[in-house]
Image: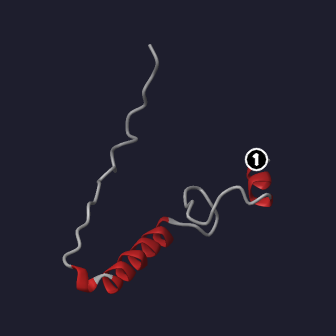
């Protein structure tokens, strides 16, 4: 029921990709790539561009339990 309410009231913006229909990980990767390429093209004359990539594949492998 919450999902229907959230979607009806448009409480999540389009950049929220987790657990949403038609918002897969591939779509988010494509969006990020387009954003990076636009930055490269816009600021090409300003110098080098850097990037930081975080590997969080195992970030959620363990569950924290309160003592």
Horizontal and vertical percent position of residue 3: 73, 52
Q: Residues within 10 Å of mark 1 (few under 14, many from 20)?
A: few
Seen in the picture, residue 7 relative to 61 is either above or below; the reply is below
Seen in the picture, residue 13 relative to 46 is either above or below; the reply is above
| Front-most of residues 53 and 45 | 45
Which quarter of the rendering shows the C terminus? top left
Lateral position of residue 50 relative to residue 67, left or right:
left
**What residue do we see at 29% from left, 54% from top?**
54
Lateral position of residue 46 relative to residue 60, left or right:
left
**What residue do we see at 46% from left, 18% from top?**
66
| Front-most of residues 12 and 18 | 12
Mark 1 lies on a secondary structure that is: helix
Which residue is identified by label 1? 2
Seen in the picture, residue 61 relative to 35 is either above or below; the reply is above
**What residue do we see at 26% from left, 60% from top?**
52
Lateral position of residue 35 relative to residue 48, left or right:
right
Seen in the picture, residue 52 relative to 42 is either above or below; the reply is above
| Front-most of residues 33 and 65 | 33
Q: How is the image coloured?
A: secondary structure
Q: How many marks?
A: 1
């Amino acid at each position: 029921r919450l999902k229907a309410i959230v979607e009806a009231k448009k409480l999540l913006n389009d950049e929220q990709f987790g657990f949403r229909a038609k918002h897969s990980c591939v779509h988010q990767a494509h969006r990020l790539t387009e954003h990076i390429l636009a930055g490269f093209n816009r600021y090409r004359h300003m110098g080098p561009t850097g990037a930081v990539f975080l590997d969080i594949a195992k970030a959620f492998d363990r569950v924290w339990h309160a003592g």
